[in-house]
Image (cartoon, helix red, strand yellow):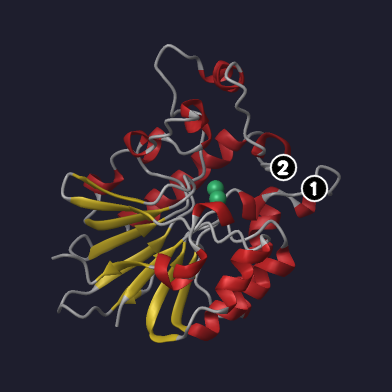
């Protein structure tokens, strides 16, 4: 029995969807899907339906692409309303979300783990100290970098994505604080929890759309064994303070090798290296 993770499946790209359909069943294993499944609700539902058939348990947390809405769409199709619709789709397939009780992974090494899918978003705080918060987008735009989220990721009913992010962090912190402090945790979100994990050599100023400093110390404040994230499309494994941080993106078709299939990109999170 294993706990695997993958993110950034981006199944609106035909090669990604075809490769996902070819993924063999893992009927004893669990899978974390750490966001960016698809902008389309229909494709999102198809992917969740497929994965829920192939794994014993699937956990999902939203990525920015999952939350996109057309600029002409009504407020009820945006922001937390779109998020809630995706949560409903997940529940129809038995997929657990950041709104559900955190399951306990029984483990194979005698240790049980609480697996917490978390949704924390970003607030432009992954920026240098000399750049003011309200100048962060202009600062990134100086190098011709503007995330498409600026046009498609709406915060309704919050006034801003920063406000939504702050609310999500308060909610998530409250839930983590209410857990039994003796139980080991795996945190799984789309966005990196720490700025020092965002190493984007070609587009460094994209960092402002990657996370929030509000989560910088969560791996030390809570009994965290491992953290899963995606979003960067740069697969990696980092250690911070004895905690393993896994970047588990599949990414766009040019970022993975078809010969390996999706199975070649499933990251084993548990059992860990001990
Ligand atoms: Fe992505
Ligand atoms: Fe993303």
Labels 2 and 1 touching (C-beta < 8 A)? yes
- From this viewpoint, which residue is outermost toward the right? 72
Q: Quadrant of the C terminus?
A: bottom left
Q: Position of residue 247 (x, y in %)?
A: 38, 52
- Residue 149's place in the image compared with 267, above or below, is above
Q: Nearer the viewer, residue 176 or 141?
A: 141
Q: How many marks?
A: 2
- How many C-alpha atoms fall within 10 Å of the one at disc 2: few (<14), some, or many (≥20)? some
Secondary structure of residue under mark 2: helix
Q: Residue at x 39, y 33 (%)?
A: 213
Q: Position of residue 136 (x, y in %)?
A: 55, 20
Answer with left or right where residue 227 lies relative to residue 232: left
Q: Nearer the viewer, residue 198 or 259?
A: 259
The residue where tag 2 is placed is 152
Answer with left or right where residue 72 lies relative to residue 2: right
Q: Position of residue 235 (x, y in %)?
A: 39, 51
Q: Position of residue 220 (x, y in %)?
A: 22, 45
The residue where tag 1 is placed is 70
Residue 46 visible within the image: yes
Whether disc 2's CB lies below 8 Å from ligand 2 is answered no
- How many C-alpha atoms fall within 10 Å of the one at disc 1: few (<14), some, or many (≥20)? few
Marked residue nearer the N-terminal end (2 or 1): 1
Q: Residue at x 64, y 57 (%)?
A: 83
């Amino acid at each position: 029995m294993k706990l695997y993770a993958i993110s950034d499946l981006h199944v609106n790209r035909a090669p990604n969807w075809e490769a996902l359909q070819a993924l063999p069943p893992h009927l004893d294993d669990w899978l974390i899907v750490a966001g960016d499944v698809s902008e389309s609700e229909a494709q999102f539902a198809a992917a969740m339906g497929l994965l829920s058939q192939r794994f014993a348990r699937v956990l999902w947390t939203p990525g920015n692409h999952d939350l996109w809405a057309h600029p002409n769409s009504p407020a009820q199709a945006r922001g937390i309303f779109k998020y809630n619709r995706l949560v409903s789709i997940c529940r129809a397939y038995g997929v657990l979300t950041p709104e559900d009780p955190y399951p306990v992974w029984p483990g194979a090494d005698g240790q049980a783990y609480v697996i917490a899918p978390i949704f924390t978003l970003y607030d432009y705080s992954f920026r240098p100290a000399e750049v003011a918060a309200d100048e962060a987008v202009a600062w990134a735009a100086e190098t011709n970098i503007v995330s498409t989220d600026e046009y498609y990721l709406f915060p309704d009913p919050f006034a801003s994505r920063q406000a939504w992010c702050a609310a999500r962090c308060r909610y998530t912190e409250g839930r983590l604080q209410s857990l039994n402090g003796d139980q080991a945790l795996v945190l799984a979100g789309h966005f990196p929890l720490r700025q020092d994990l965002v190493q984007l050599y070609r587009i460094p100023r994209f960092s402002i759309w990657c996370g929030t400093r509000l989560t910088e110390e969560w791996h030390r404040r809570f009994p965290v064994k491992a953290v899963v994230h995606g979003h960067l499309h740069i697969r990696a494994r980092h250690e911070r303070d004895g905690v393993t941080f896994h970047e588990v993106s599949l990414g766009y078709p040019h970022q993975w090798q078809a010969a390996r299939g999706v199975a070649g990109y499933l990251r084993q999170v548990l059992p860990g290296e001990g």
